[in-house]
Image (cartoon, helix red, strand yellow):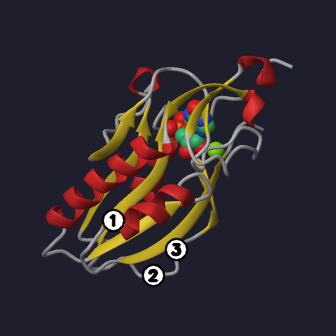
């Protein structure tokens, strides 16, 4: 597994610092709100688990899973809900927790769907942002770190469902996906 990593982008220590800062900011901003953290599976599961423990105000959590329609590597711009939320969003201040904001197509679709359910507010917290690749008109409210236009894995992010369990964030050797 480790032999497939070209270089470490964020070490475990750097990630811990990022989480601490995000948690403090979110705790302050949501002090008088009704925070519901929504994790978009599966990539954000590690980030979610760490981030929620860095938040020191009352909050609830829920999970959803989507897949994009369309063939090839470009998503068509529509998502299909594979697993929906269990909670009625009425009255909640939603924080969408994502692993990485790439084209932004997935998250802008999810946001649009959830807005129809009358939450009080919807914001986005992404562990990573790849602004160079943005297609959809969407901006994250909280960003852990910007990353260059390289394929990254670890800390929940996968390539072909692998590498999610790496405790740090690394750049995958192109030879792995060019095989
Ligand atoms: P978007 O709709 O293009 O923003 O898609 C975002 C999703 O693509 C993320 O939730 C990831 O699952 C996946 N993704 C995008 N870039 C990477 C990457 O560098 N490594 C791993 N997964 C990625
Ligand atoms: Mg993925």
98 in relation to 59, above or below: above
Q: CA distance from mark 1 to mark 2?
A: 23 Å
- Residue 12, given in percent of the width and then of the height, sits at 49, 45
- Residue 6, given in percent of the width and then of the height, sits at 65, 22
What residue appears at the point 56 percent right and 22 percent down from the top-left corner?
A: 150
What residue appears at the point 43 percent right and 45 percent down from the top-left corner?
A: 13
Q: CA distance from mark 1 to mark 3?
A: 23 Å
Residue positioned most to the right: 179
What residue appears at the point 43 percent right and 27 percent down from the top-left corner?
A: 134
Q: CA distance from mark 3 to mark 2?
A: 6 Å
Residue placed under numbered mark 3 in the picture: 85
Residue positioned most to the front: 13
Residue 25 in which image quadrant: bottom left
Quarter of the image with the C terminus is top right
- Residue 146, given in percent of the width and then of the height, sits at 38, 31
Q: Are marks 3 and 2 in contact (CB under 8 Å)?
A: yes
Regarding residue 77, the answer to whether it shows in the image is no
Residue placed under numbered mark 1 in the picture: 54
């Amino acid at each position: 597994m480790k032999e497939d990593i070209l270089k470490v982008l964020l070490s475990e220590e750097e990630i811990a610092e990022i989480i601490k800062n995000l948690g403090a900011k979110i705790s302050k901003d949501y002090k008088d709100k009704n925070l519901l953290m929504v994790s978009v599976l599966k990539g954000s599961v590690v980030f979610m688990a760490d981030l929620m423990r860095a938040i020191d105000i009352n909050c609830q959590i829920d999970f959803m899973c989507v897949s994009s329609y369309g063939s090839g590597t470009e998503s068509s711009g529509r998502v299909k809900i594979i697993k929906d939320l269990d909670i009625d969003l009425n009255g909640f201040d939603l924080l969408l927790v994502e692993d990485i904001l790439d084209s932004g197509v997935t998250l802008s679709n999810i946001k649009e769907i959830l807005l129809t359910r009358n939450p009080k507010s919807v914001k986005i917290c992404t562990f990573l942002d790849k602004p160079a690749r943005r297609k959809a008109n969407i901006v994250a409210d909280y960003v852990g770190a910007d990353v260059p236009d390289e394929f990254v894995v670890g800390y929940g992010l996968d390539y072909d469902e692998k590498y999610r369990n790496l405790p740090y964030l690394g750049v995958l050797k192109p030879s792995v996906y060019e095989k």
